Image (cartoon, rainbow, N blue to C red):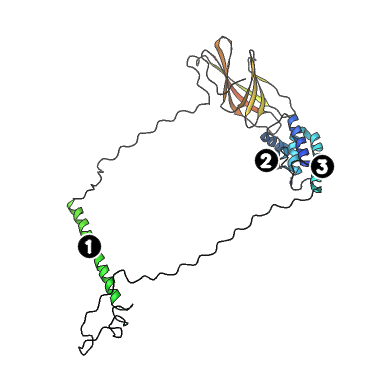
């Protein structure tokens, strides 16, 4: 079994669970960076590695033993080169223990559905000759060349039972009934056509033609869309003229680098970034108080109240990414100071 072999499934209690517990301890010692942050940092050292957030979750939760080329970047982000060597030894022990276990049989496959038997078509139903009533009796009269009457019977050529008689399938009886029915339908259709054309010509219809001389009034125009704001309440009109604004950029360093506090020009307010991932968290330091803001993002704001009716509002305007030279992640704040009626923030500082 090579370090880059296929992923191995693990039991609830076994070598993979021991390896996952060690990886969780390493993650906790590295101050628990988010899965997204681990993937982002690993690509600076291993640009070709296929590390995903789902792989990190499976490793920490002992769902399976991933391949070594997926575990190595995670170990490097959490502990550096020293922990990569120790992680490789622990990974080999877990992989060897899994290889010694008997392979589990594959789960049974569900039976294939049996197609239903084809239903034979229903036999054609012979329609009885009752739609138009019984065939009319033939009128007596001479049917021969000599002018003598021939009896109408089953044996006569023109009788009901003869091939050319009225009662035979191919005789003149059935075409005669069909022609009478068709003639009746034609007469009804002609009557309806004359009735409709007369109503249209005389203008006696009940339905009046629509009046198109005046076009319909146009629908009212939709209200104009309000301008988008930055997620915080506007400043009061009484303090807008005296408010002062300043831009401050703070950064989150790598896991092995110390965190530094970014200060304003006057040195009366400092910001220390604690986490950048799915949400932003930072620590605020002032002359009168210190507090923490968690679960925020771009456009979110926090308002701090100072002495003598002064206030300070912090708005996150941009969150950058790690650079190619292991530079900290830059986070840009817009700081506005004023006095009087304080604006409302979208987040609290506790």
| Vertical placement of residue 275 versus 75, above or below | above
Mark 3, Cα crowd under 10 Å, few <14 / some 14-19 / many 20+, is some
Residue 173 on image: x %, y % = 28, 76
Quarter placement of the C terminus: top right
Between the C-alphas of marks 1 and 3, the distance is: 97 Å
1 vs 310, left or right, is right
Residue 298 on image: x %, y % = 58, 28
Q: Secondary structure at mark 3?
A: helix
Q: Earlier in the sequence, mark 1 or mark 2?
A: 2
Q: Secondary structure at mark 2?
A: helix
Between the C-alphas of marks 3 and 2, the distance is: 23 Å
Q: Report which quarter residue 46 is drawn in.
A: top right
**Which residue bears the numbered disc 2?**
54
Q: Report the number of numbered marks.
A: 3
347 vs 324, left or right, is left
**Which residue bears the numbered disc 3?**
93
Pointer 1 with pointer 2, Cβ within 8 A: no
What residue is at 69 percent from the left and 37 percent from the top?
39
What residue is at 67 percent from the left and 39 percent from the top?
53
Residue 304 on image: x %, y % = 58, 17
Mark linked to residue 190: 1
Mark linked to residue 79: none
What residue is at 66 percent from the left and 35 percent from the top?
36
């Amino acid at each position: 079994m090579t370090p880059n072999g296929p992923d191995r499934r693990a039991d609830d209690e076994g070598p993979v669970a021991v390896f996952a517990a060690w990886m969780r301890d390493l993650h906790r010692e590295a101050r628990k960076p988010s899965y997204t942050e681990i993937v982002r940092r690993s690509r600076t050292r291993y640009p070709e590695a296929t590390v995903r957030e789902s792989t990190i979750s499976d490793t920490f939760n002992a769902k399976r033993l991933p391949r070594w080329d997926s575990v190595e970047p995670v170990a490097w982000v959490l502990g550096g080169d020293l922990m990569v060597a120790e992680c490789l030894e622990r990974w080999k022990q877990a992989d060897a223990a899994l290889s010694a276990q008997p392979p589990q049989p594959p789960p049974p496959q569900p039976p294939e559905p049996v197609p239903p038997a084809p239903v034979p078509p229903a036999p054609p139903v012979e329609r009885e000759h009752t739609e138009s009533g019984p065939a009319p009796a033939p009128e007596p009269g001479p049917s021969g060349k000599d002018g003598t009457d021939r009896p109408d019977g089953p044996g006569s050529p023109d009788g009901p039972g003869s091939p050319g008689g009225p009662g035979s399938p191919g005789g003149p009886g059935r075409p005669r009934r069909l022609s009478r029915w068709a003639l009746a339908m034609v007469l009804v259709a002609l009557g309806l056509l004359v009735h409709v054309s007369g109503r249209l010509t005389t203008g006696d219809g009940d339905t009046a033609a629509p009046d198109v001389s005046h076009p319909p009034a146009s629908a009212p125009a939709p209200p104009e869309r309000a301008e988008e704001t930055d997620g915080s309440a506007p400043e009061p009109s009484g303090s807008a003229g005296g408010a002062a604004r300043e831009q401050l950029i703070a950064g989150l360093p790598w896991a092995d680098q110390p965190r530094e506090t970014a200060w304003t020009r006057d040195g009366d307010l400092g910001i220390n970034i604690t986490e950048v991932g799915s949400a932003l968290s930072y620590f605020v330091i002032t002359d009168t108080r210190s507090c923490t803001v968690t679960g925020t993002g771009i456009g979110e704001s926090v308002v701090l109240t100072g002495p003598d009716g002064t206030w300070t509002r912090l708005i996150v305007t941009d969150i950058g990414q790690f650079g190619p030279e292991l530079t900290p992640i830059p986070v840009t704040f817009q700081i506005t100071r004023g006095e009087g009626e304080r604006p409302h923030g979208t987040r609290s500082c506790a």
